[in-house]
Image (cartoon, coloured by chain):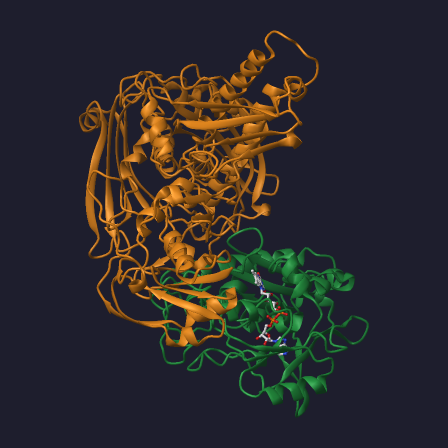
Amino acid sequence: MRRFTYIAPTSREDAFSAFAAAGEGARWVAGGTNIYDLMKLDIERPAHLIDVTAIEGLDAIETGGEMLRFGTNARMADVAANETILRDYPVLSESLWKAASQQLRNMATVGANLLQRTRCLYFRNGAGGASGGAVIYPCNRREPGSGCAAIGGIDRGQAVLGASANCTAVSPGDWPVALTAMDAQVELAGPQGARAIPIAELYRLPGETPQIEFTLGDGEMITGISVPKTRAGRRSTYHKVRDRESYAFALASAAVALDMDGDTIRKAHVALGGVATVPWRSPEAEAVLAGKPLTEGLAEKAARAAFAEAKAGKLNGYKIDLGIRTLVDALSIAAERNS
Amino acid sequence: MAHAMLVPARIAKGRVTSVDTGAASAVPGVLRVLTAKDYPAPPETDENGPPPPPPTILDAIAYRGQPIALVVAETIEAAIEGAEAVTARYAEEAFASKIDSKGAVREETEPREAGDGTRALADAATRIDQRYVTPTQHHNPIELIATSARLTDGKLRIHESSQYSSGVRGAVARSLGYDPATIEADSSYIGGGFGQKGSLYGYSAIVAHAARLIRRPVKLVVPRSQIFHQATFRPEAHHHVQLGADTGGKMVAAVYHAEHEQSRAGQFPPSDYHEATSRLYDIPNYQGTAANIRLDRNDPGYMRCPHPHPSCFAFESAVDELAIELGRDPVEFRLANDGMTDVLTGKPYSSKFMAECLREGARRFGWDRRTAEPGSMRSPSGGSIGWGVAVAAYPSMMVPSIGTLRVYANGRTTYSISGHEMGQGIRTSIANVLVQGLGIDPDKLEISVGNTATAPQHITAGSWGSAGAIPTTAQAVSRMQSALKQLLGGRTPRGDIHRRLASTKRPYLEVQASALGPGQDASALESLRQGGYAVAGPEYPAFTTMSYIAHFVEVEVEPRLRRVRMPRVVSVADCGRVISPRTARSQIIGGVVWAFGSALREGTEIDPRYAGYLNCDLADYVVPVNADIGEIEVDLINEPDPLANSMGLKGLGEVVMAGASAAIANAIHHATGKRIRHMPIRIEDML
Ligand SMILES: Cc1cc2nc3c(=O)[nH]c(=O)nc-3n(C[C@H](O)[C@H](O)[C@H](O)COP(=O)(O)OP(=O)(O)OC[C@H]3O[C@@H](n4cnc5c(N)ncnc54)[C@H](O)[C@@H]3O)c2cc1C
């Protein structure tokens, strides 16, 4: 834990100029449920924290227009409990209330949630902070070029999809997986102006540069998230398997939404969590499902297609089997929901 | 008050060659950085004397995370920042961190034997030969281990979250060269203990010395990740269990070898795995061998239900396997093998109601509706239902205690006694005896436990806290009544005890009481006064005393995802007389919850390349949450033990956990046909 300054501007303009003035070491903070943790672990070492939650107009939950819109500062708990979301987009609501705990969801914001960092044990516990362990582990994400202790180590939690020889860390969030399935856009603003990108573009595969996790310009801020409305939302679910019944990150999860015509799937939205280095959309599974009536056999075929490229390490091979079962289960849960 | 933070060694074995404290000292608010050279050398120890106190700060590193420096600062934040700024150079040596690591040294210990196990096994008609693994686990009480030290009026006053305040006093005195009489250790309130706080740690003296050097009170709260590395833990253990039955289905042989992770100099005894498993059944030929596997790790130690929990997991899984092999019902098979003699000593049990626990548990659970075939029972939602049973035992020990009771004329009552409160409710049990015996107002009753300044203190563990305190308290009550009677000299004034006392014009009346375990004499009391280990049992001169429990578990396994749920449990315990029904029931519920956690959730990960604990926080060390736990129905046989002590009670807090994990594994087998011989049982084991 190092010394830092803290301010909470109330307008975007003030926030951007504060960020620029702070220079090196400036970071945004919202609910603080991830960044403070990482500061105690000595992984994040900001010199200046600029709190975005006092900025006006960034916490709206809008369900009336063409798109669903969530201001970045909307709390996880509020979006999870929103009646329209609960009824028409259970995949979104479930991905939030199956994450963390009620206390954390009361603090944590839906925009910053997208930027939470991996739970890889070697990443978190190996930086030398008093709250970390007693080992400094090599980690390419923390210290580029130092190596990856998870590869060849205790890799039970590591990714089977999207990993590289430099990093196998799982993308931890549940909400980003649901948003990925639902074609969400992330709205950004910076000193240079505003833009929106598909959520898939926010996340970068580790490849040769695992330390670069997000596509975000310097000083750029997430301002909101928008999700195109779709009737597939009603027949949707976020199915999550973890090491206990609540309050744990996913070992495997599946976000599924089905646009059905009678028994036939017109279009399926499928994304996977807990198994991949980024929120993992599966066009392979979606292609298997499109235009066909949903049967157990088809669901299994789709799920196997989703994991066709999966690669196991020492202890995480079960995630392939578990991921397949989770997706098959999720498809049947979603299909049984009323449209 | 100044705040302190320890700096952990970044190697697993070797020497610290230099410590750079420059950057740390420059952190604003840092008062002092102490390293090995600031501490007195470890005291001389002689072979016949007490074991050496835990070391303070040394340059020789025996395990990863061992403290190499202490940073003392004005604020906790500055102490942390300073601790993180300390760097060191090391001469690192090769190390062994896991049972199968190169450099691990096996050391066999004394066997526990009756009859001829190997021979009887060879002659047996039916045999089971299986290996079971129980994991490394850490206690993780929510309340972190902590100490503070302050010097006032020539006394060193230590507040520490310890189950062994007198041990803290003794260790600090010996490490730093104090007369123990000048130290007071107060552990009145410590939060959860679970055995972690029964061990003595070097930081007590490390912090006390800092307080002396800077002439200010100093406080240290050890962060959870460092607790994993420094505090004792439940070691991984490997259990090789061989059982043999004769043609009539009677168990005739048990050959059981247990070995566990051990530090290079650690004392946590492996032969104690046999304490419980040899005393469940009438198995005349029991060969119990055990070994330490010496590694470059911190000391393992006592964690709730220390040996019987892992050993009963292994043994009661094997008994289940044998019952199935013989085509016998697991409850009926256990009842048929019950016995009333301790085969290790040939002496009778002072009381044993294991069979009653089994019968009552089976009745409440509805065991007769069970169909034997694995996978034959289904839930309405299509899940596989499994019903499992297991029994367990735990030594019922006795510790002497000394209590001082004062009743005041003004309505107050004070009582101080040996024993620590660590969430088990010892204050409540004591209060029950005082309130019922004296008819006093509980709101005006002050009970002091865990404080060396008010009563001699023992290490409170092993379920002997209540067994030690209650008979003494009962005696204090009767002494008080006779003292008052004598004082009144035949008069019978009206009113409660305080008013009767007031009628004698005395402000208060004080009595002392003490009680010993069976076979103990006054030397045990003397040992207690000196802060020594004065525990007796479970083998007493004329008998053996054990507590018993039977657990019945229902699991449901999801059809596709294979997640295991535990909708209901019935647990019935034999702890002799029940002193405090509410705390007793709560002990059983807590024990079952922990056994669930142990069976299905908890395990500490150690990467052998580094010898550090990897999942060293509560996010990654997975303990159960509320949503994991189904209905737990508990019952107590409540038959006083006629011999163990004057009140007829036996220990409860430990036995409650034993065996329940085996019942879960047995239920999983019944649900799925799959026998899993290790803990924790995780989703990957079920697929
Ligand atoms: C014990 C625990 C359990 C958890 N379990 C789960 C779980 O099961 N599933 C799950 O999905 N999540 C889980 N979480 C993570 C939790 O969801 C995230 O910590 C939370 O969503 C982050 O939101 P926040 O507002 O607190 O972010 P902060 O900690 O404030 O910020 C997170 C990151 O976002 C950046 N940031 C903040 N606001 C902005 C902005 N407007 N623009 C750009 N950058 C910004 C910060 O600089 C920081 O890097 C858990 C967390 C904890 C502590």
Q: Nearest the camera: A184 or B259?
A: B259
Residue placed furthest toward the bottom? A192
The chain displayed orange equals B
Q: How many marks?
A: 0
Q: Report the residue at 32% width, 60% height from top.
A: B64
Residue placed furthest toward the left? B119
| Residue B595 is at least partly visible in this image | yes
Q: Splitting the image into 4 quarters, where does residue B61 fall?
A: bottom left
Horizontal side, residue B526 vs residue A235: left or right: left
Q: Nearest the camera: B144 or B185?
A: B185
Q: Nearest the camera: B428 or A65?
A: B428
Counting from the top left corner in percent of width and height, residue B411 is at: 66, 27
Q: Nearest the camera: B548 or B669?
A: B548
B339 w.r.t. B4: above or below: above
Q: Splitting the image into 4 quarters, where does residue B85 fall?
A: bottom left
Ligand 1: which quarter? Answer: bottom right
Q: Colour of chain A?
A: green
Counting from the top left corner in percent of width and height, residue A266 is at: 67, 69
Residue placed furthest toward the front? B505
Horizontal side, residue A109 vs residue B34: left or right: right
Counting from the top left corner in percent of width and height, residue A102 is at: 65, 57
| Residue A141 is at least partly visible in this image | no
Residue placed furthest toward the right? A64
B428 w.r.t. B560: above or below: above
